[in-house]
Image (cartoon, rainbow, N blue to C red):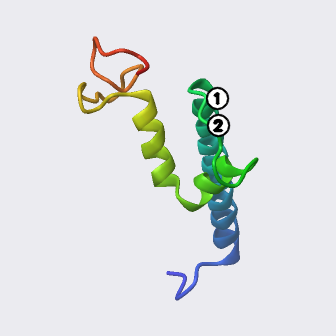
Amino acid sequence: PYGAYPPTWISVPRFVGSLAFTIWAIWALMKTRANVRAQYQIPEEKCKGCEDLCCSVWCSCCSVAQILRHTGEYETYHSKCLSSTGLEDGAPACV
């Protein structure tokens, strides 16, 4: 109904919302990664001082996988959706 491009009153809020969500997602992953590193005493190796931000921006899927490897033993215990730890009942909370 709008032709090739939607009107500005649709495009601008969509862009602003997408940008805000992207910034929030990067910030949340960066803070989570920093907390996991602090809890497990994992030092920064590259990009001293901004490694969490760089990894969250440039390789978010790798950051999530790294967090999962450090917080659960998925080879031994099966994962479970909507549980408090993400693992099946009886699995240790932290490995």
The disc placed on residue 89 is none
Q: Position of residue 67 (x, y in %)?
A: 48, 38
Q: Position of residue 8 (x, y in %)?
A: 69, 76
**Nearest to the observer: residue 3 or residue 68:** 68
Q: Residue at coordinates 59% horizontally, 52% vertically from top-left?
A: 56
Q: Residue at coordinates 51% horizontally, 48% vertically from top-left?
A: 63
Marks 1 and 2: CB-CB under 8 Å? yes
Decide: few, some or many residues near mark 1? Use Cα within 10 Å; few <14, some 14-19, many ≥20.
few
Q: What amino acid type is highlighted by mark number 1?
A: Ala
**Nearest to the observer: residue 18 or residue 50:** 50
Q: Residue at coordinates 59% horizontally, 79% vertically from top-left?
A: 6
| Residue tagged 1 | 38
- The number of numbered discs placed on residues in the rendered structure image is 2
| Residue tagged 2 | 34
| Secondary structure under the numbered disc 1 in the rendered image | helix
Q: Residue furthest top?
A: 90
Q: What amino acid type is highlighted by mark number 2?
A: Ala
| Secondary structure under the numbered disc 2 in the rendered image | helix
Q: Quadrant of residue 36?
A: top right
Q: Residue at coordinates 30% horizontally, 16% vertically from top-left?
A: 91
Q: Measured along the vertical axis of the image, is residue 30 above or below residue 17?
A: above
Q: CA distance from mark 1 to mark 2?
A: 6 Å
State which quarter of the image contains the C terminus: top left
